[in-house]
Image: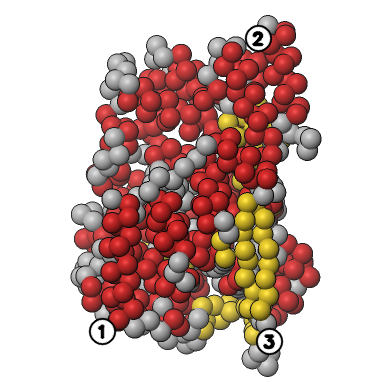
Amino acid sequence: MYEPIMLDEEKVFKDPVHRYVHVRSALIWDLIDSPEFQRLRRIKQLGTSFFTFHGGEHSRFNHSLGVYEIMRRILETFEGRAKLSNEEKLLCLCAALLHDVGHGPFSHSFEKVFRFDHEDWTKEIIMGDTKINSILRTVSDDFPRKVAEVISKTYENKLIVSLISSQIDADRMDYLLRDAYYTGVHYGNFDIERILRVMRPTEEGIVIKASGMHAVEDYIMSRYQMYWQVYFHPVTRSGEVVLRKIFQRAKELFDQGYDFGIDPVNFHPFFTDQISLHDYISLDETVVYFYMHQWRHEKDAILSDLCSRFLDRNLLQYVEYNPRQFRTENEIRQLFAEAGIDSNYYVEVDSTSDLPYDYYRPEKDQERISIMLVKPNGEQAELSTMSDIVESVCGKRRFDYKLFYPADLLEALPIEQARKIKERLKVVMSDE
Amino acid sequence: MNKGHAKILRLVEVLGEVKGRKKLQKIVYICKKMQVDFEERFQFHMYGPYSEELTLRVDELCSYGLMEEERESKGVIETYRYSLNDVGKDFLRFHNVELGAGETLIQRLDQENSRFLELVSTILFFENLPYEEMLVKIFTLKSKQRYTEEEVQRGIAFIDECKQITV
């Protein structure tokens, strides 16, 4: 049986969200110290949200420690209630700490352009030739694999998986509170202490004592508000669009054999789709910023302009977009092209959507694990059947489409050319 | 809406109608593993590999009236059928998307039921594991489906057949 090695004395991190993050396990301490985990300090949690909410500069390092701390508290609540061995408890803590370790710089934009999934890299970092892997192996040879399986949801113990990935898990609880704190908005707050007190373990996952329903309602509504007010803010999305276009342009130039002022060696593996673990770990946001500073002085006008836009926050303007207006979108692209503006880099439709909560619907293949409430008599009921508030948002997916365009370049066009484009921009949002 | 949406519409057009989202999910996943150019990312969920992005695209296509969704009830069991409408066909012609040999594969996959496609996609998800470990994963994570080793063998043979189609 595994006996955890404890530190001589408990270490704590001061944390603005949870006040303190407590570390007693020597293994957790070593993981935090590993280069792959320290790299997360150089990757922002909210990508380009800082353009909209200047406080949103916190990193994935902060968030990962927060998820670990919530998991530690959940395990305290479960003491005497869940049959978890010492090794399984450590597994929960490691999975919580490492669940985001595979994120790359500006993850969402980067993954869209270079078409990979950060979860695959999380697995690679845990299973590959890394410091993290060597630390995890001190528990047992197959411990890294177990950690990777919990994160990728293929581990056999459903309770452990649900603590990291479900509709009410340690990851979501931390990011909502943390992102609300750093962006300075109030609607992301909910009573986490209450939720942790009313969580109960079962073989199939966690359930919530019915007396805690209102705290969970608050959590669901916080999530709903955060998505629409913070995560999907159009200015943030405009920043992501510009970033994607920078990566696309740099790749296109590389493919054409363009002579860059400074060879973007850190990007070569991504441009050629031959990425090693070392290449991946070496890239963080400081490296991306370095190249952006170089590229803003490139002789290629598009790359130079896009980088300046990103660095100086001169982003693209937007209008609402009706997806049935795809022919009008094409007309807009053509009009911009006729005006000498490359619409591949300056016109973009971006869509986003959110489903705040849903119950398990096998017929729709939604695959969401319902939040179950347990009544005093032991019976269980799905949350939306007991809560009118949750029922009102349950299963309701909301979409938002925007067409982004360069308003400053448009205004600089001859009046007649600009008028035609503006006219089409009105049509593209209409139901006609 | 973009080419990614158009590829899903093309899949539906090739089949005329898709019965059930689960089947659609598994067809797209298997196609992707056979190098057919679908863009959605998949992770492991209750029914095996599952793509939230694909669910989202289907919802978008239905919500904006490019695809029809019909609910069919048989007792307590409900299924959804998907087909193209005129706007969807117009969108598809506009984007001019074809899936090459993938279209033959899609038709072959549609001949199998969802349960078998779930097994096939699960085998593909764990294809890097040694055979014995893969069996343990399937029997543990898919215990409710009660797959037998003969079915797993048939699934492996079927994967070889699929590879031949897209070579």
* Cα distance between the residues tagged 3 and 2: 66 Å
Q: Examine the image and state in which quarter residue A176 appears.
A: bottom right
The residue tagged 2 is: A413
The residue that appears at 30% across and 39% down in the rendered structure is: A273
- Element marked by disc 1: loop
Q: The N terminus of chain B appears in which quarter of the rendering?
A: top right
Q: Which amino acid does label 3 sit on?
A: Lys
The residue that appears at 48% across and 71% down in the rendered structure is: B114
Q: Which of marks 1 and 2 is nearer the N terminus?
A: 1
Q: Which of A109 and B91 is in front in this view?
A: B91
Same chain shared by disc 1 and disc 2? yes
* Image position, residue A97 (x, y; %): 40, 61
* Image position, residue A130 (x, y; %): 23, 54
- The numbered mark at residue A1 is 1
Q: Which amino acid does label 2 sit on?
A: Leu
Q: Which of A329 and A50 is in front in this view?
A: A329
The residue that appears at 78% across and 70% down in the rendered structure is: A388
* Cα distance between the residues tagged 1 and 2: 74 Å
Q: In this view, which residue lies farthest toward the top?
A: A414
Label 1: few (<14), some (14–19) or many (≥20) C-alpha neighbours in 10 Å: few
Establish if B17 lies above or below A163: above
- Element marked by disc 2: loop
* Cα distance between the residues tagged 3 and 1: 36 Å
Q: Which amino acid does label 1 sit on?
A: Met
Q: Which of A145 and A175 is in front in this view?
A: A145
Chain name for mark 3: A
Q: In the visual, does A430 lie left or right of A417?
A: right
Q: Nearer the viewer, residue A307 or A14?
A: A307
* Image position, residue B84 (x, y; %): 63, 51
The residue tagged 3 is: A375
